Amino acid sequence: MSEEPDSNVEEIARKLFSGPVSFLKSAPALKFLPDATAPEVAFAGRSNVGKSSLLNKLANRTGLARTSNTPGRTQELNFFEVGDPLRFRLVDMPGYGFAKAPKDVVRKWRFLINDYLRGRAVLKRTLVLVDSRHGIKDVDREVMKMLDEAAVSYQLVLTKADKVKATELEEVTRRTAEEARRHVAAYPEIIATSSETGFGMDRLREEVVRAALA
Ligand code: GTP
Ligand code: MG
């Protein structure tokens, strides 16, 4: 961050995320996006990977973003504001790769996600969430390729780390990092998290603040 020395990032992240975080609006289509007046960090990933849960945990607020056992819960781009005065926004997105949703819905979400990710000038980083139990899937690779081609920087974040053994988490982190290195727009560093236990959350808060306020 330009105005703040690196050693302060941890402190700034802690303060920002324990301060005001509020829902701004839902955008079902691009024309409903809020004015691009603040930096944004977006949460992408397959349906049910834990995007909304991670956003809630990051902000220490249960129920800020709606979560569900059933894939397909988040159906629009949901914008949340961090800081008062506003410092940056978090964007919770619909999941991709949800096979059971009607085809026209899947298409609509795909266009919405892709158009937003490719065209948003204030988007500083996209977090691409990957389930620790499954690792990167082909549908993730398609999104990663799209982001590489559009030169949108992204970071892979492993979710649900509480669901795997420590050795498995190590192995999936290693494999994921190896694959990230082959993608031009991907950060080489992988962050493993659990919205259940809070594992990895301080590190993720720091990364988000670093990306948003760079
Ligand atoms: P869509 O909006 O449908 O794309 O899903 P999403 O990616 O937002 O997932 P959501 O946060 O709604 O979580 C899906 C399910 O996974 C819920 O039942 C959550 O409780 C569960 N879940 C999310 N994160 C974790 C985690 O870190 N650990 C465990 N054990 N369960 C989790
Ligand atoms: Mg969701």
Image: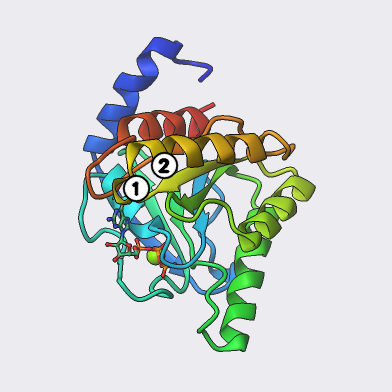
Which residue position holds label 2?
168
Identify residue type, mark 1.
Val
Residue 138 located left or right of residue 192: right
Q: Which residue occupies the foreground of this view, 18 or 140?
A: 140
- How far separated are the C-alphas under marks 2 and 1? 6 Å
Quadrant of image for the C terminus: top right
Residue 145 located left or right of residue 90: right
Report which quarter residue 102 is drawn in. bottom right
Q: Sort mark 2 into few (<14), some (14-19) or many (20+) by Cα contacts within 10 Å.
A: some
Q: In what element is the residue under mark 2? A: helix
Q: So how many labels did they put on this image?
A: 2
Q: How is the image coloured?
A: rainbow
Label 1 beta carbon less than 8 Å to ligand 1: no
Which residue position holds label 1?
164
Label 2 beta carbon less than 8 Å to ligand 1: no
Q: Position of residue 110 (x, y in %)?
A: 63, 71
**Number of the label disc, if any, that sits on residue 94:** none
Q: Which residue occupies the foreground of this view, 86 or 107?
A: 107
Asked whether the residues under the numbered discs 2 and 1 touch, taking CB atoms below 8 Å apart as contact, a structural biologist would say yes
Identify residue type, mark 2.
Glu
The quarter of the image that holds ligand 1 is: bottom left
Q: Position of residue 21 (x, y in %)?
A: 29, 47
Residue at position x 36%, y 34% in the image: 205
Report which quarter residue 53 is drawn in. bottom left
Relative height, residue 7 to residue 10 (above, below): above
